[in-house]
Image (cartoon, grey):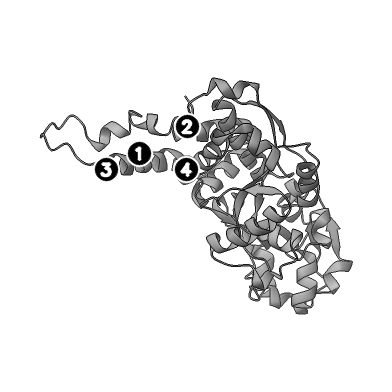
Amino acid sequence: MSTHPRLRALFALLAVLGLAVAFAACGGDDSGDSTSTSAEATTGSDTSANLIQSNPDNGSISLTIGSKNFTEQYILGEIYAQGLEAAGYDVDTDLNLGDEQVALKALQSGDISGYPEYTSTALTSFFDTPPEDVPGDAQKAYDESKTEFTDLGLVSYPPTPFSSANAVGMLKSKADELGITTISDLADHQDLTLYGSPECRQRIDCLAGLEKYYGLDGLRDNFTPVDIGLRYDVLDKGDADLSIIFTTDAQLFTSSDYVTLEDDKHVLPAGNVIFIASQDAVDEAGPDFGTTIEKVQSNLSLEVMQELNARVDIDKEKPAQAAEQYLQQFGYID
């Protein structure tokens, strides 16, 4: 099954627009020579501005890039790892660590050099920020989490353009049948079955938050942990009435079969991705490390992330392949 044509063409369109903007920013040719136009940018002649240069001094530095255990994280881990490899580093990956607590422990123990995390997850899961107090502004959320990570001796890099949040998803047919549009509506339907990741029981932006802030205590009795990769399968097969999904999921944009319930009490805050690294890795790797991280994530808009997720979850591409195509399309690697 192939992704919707709109998504399939998105990479090429966004890359062309990005290059055209870059060309325009350089100014026109006042000499009247019409051979240099924005059309030239579409051929890739301006992609050298994005190209990651390999530094031979980085070859002796070994890095291990980690990620948590779901599609979006696998893709992000590959993007960072392949970008750093292009910069000349000796890069290994560990892209199925588990939840955020496992990933953080792996970073603090030195098993990995760094991994991508969400500001909302960091603030609520690591630093006990109530979900309603998580800043909606990406820079503010980053500043708050950066301060906390600094206190842990870790380095965090500026956020991605896109943000993501947990959401409660249903089949549209079931939601229409029961007249459910918001999470608050579930108060009268606590006999519904809910599937989510095993750690959902403890997470404030998951089942724990639904209980505490929405009063949905009955859902705990009907909660079943499931591999996060099956979050739509359980809906399709009728195993689950409700499933914890992500707002960046490709399925929400390629199919009209699903709906997300409105988080009317704002319990499931959105968060941009920030790359967290150990201070030792940063010090050893030098300036190319941070420069490369910020460079390769600069085109990760919401639409691009949806496209990447679609390539893996729907088109069944390998995360490494989708990441490589992204890096090539935007001129980061040859």
- Residue in front for this viewpoint, 290 or 85: 290
Q: Which mark is residue 24?
A: 3
The amino acid pointed to by label 1 is: Leu
- For the residues bearing labels 4 and 1, Cβ distance under 8 angstroms: no
Task: State the residue at coordinates (33%, 28%).
Answer: 45
Numbered disc in front, either 4 or 1: 1
The amino acid pointed to by label 3 is: Ala
The amino acid pointed to by label 2 is: Tyr
Q: Which mark is residue 38?
A: none
* Neighbours of disc 1 within 10 Å: few (<14), some (14-19), many (20+): many
Residue 114 shows in the view: no
* Neighbours of disc 4 within 10 Å: few (<14), some (14-19), many (20+): few
Residue 103 shows in the view: yes
Picture coordinates of residue 317, whole percent (x, y): 62, 33
Judged from the image, the secondary structure of the residue bearing numbered disc 4 is helix
Task: State the residue at coordinates (61%, 21%).
Answer: 59
Numbered disc in front, either 2 or 4: 2
Residue 247 higher or lower than 72, as above or below: below
- Residue in front for this viewpoint, 34 or 224: 34
**Residue 177 horizontal side relative to residue 84, left or right:** right
Q: How many marks?
A: 4
Which residue is denoted by mark 1 in the rendering?
19
- For the residues bearing labels 2 and 3, Cβ distance under 8 angstroms: no
Which residue is denoted by mark 2 in the rendering?
332
Residue at mark 4 to residue at mark 1: CA–CA distance: 22 Å
| Marks 3 and 1, the one that precedes in the sequence | 1
Looking at the image, which residue sits at the far left?
32
Task: State the residue at coordinates (71%, 56%).
Answer: 151
